[in-house]
Image (tube, helix red, strand yellow):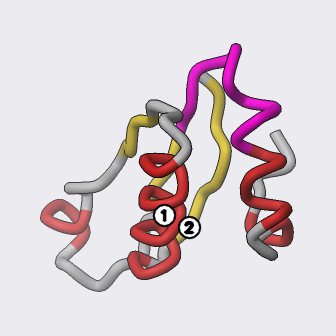
Amino acid sequence: MRELIRTNDIVLLSAVEALLDGAGIGHLVLDQHMSVMEGSIGLLPRRLLVEEARFAGARALLMEAGLGAELSAR
């Protein structure tokens, strides 16, 4: 698994998940429930990971959707 995006924006995260679902690209969101630990202020970013083999396709999909600026540098 490889990190595709890291964000505090739950709307962006939802949009990216919808794009990936539509393209049949499996993904995993980490740190989704950390807000319970931090006091629900949305301080800790969530990380969206995709399989290594699908990473290039997922990046291209986000670039085509105009979300290239949101991609993780990792």
Assign the N terminus to one quadrant of the image.
top right
Q: Which residues are magenta?
A: 49-58
Residue 46 x/y as whole percent: 44, 57
- First of labels 1, 2 by sequence position: 2
Residue at 42% across / 81% down in the picture? 11
- Residue at label 1? 45
| Frontmost residue, 68 versus 30 | 68
Residues at circles 1 and 2 in contact by the CB criterion of under 8 Å: yes
From this view, report whether residue 56 is shown above or below residue 37: above
| Other residues around mark 1 within 10 Å, as few (<14) / some (14–19) / many (≥20) | some
The residue furthest left is 36
Q: Assess whether residue 33 is covered by the magenta stretch.
A: no
- Residue at label 2? 7
Determine whether, in the image, residue 38 is placed left or right of residue 58: left
Residue at 13% across / 65% down in the picture? 36
| Other residues around mark 2 within 10 Å, as few (<14) / some (14–19) / many (≥20) | some
Main SS, magenta region, reads: helix
Looking at the rendered structure, the kind of residue marked 2 is Thr
Residue at 53% across / 62% down in the picture? 16
Assign the C terminus to one quadrant of the image.
top right
Q: For mark 2, give the secondary structure.
A: strand
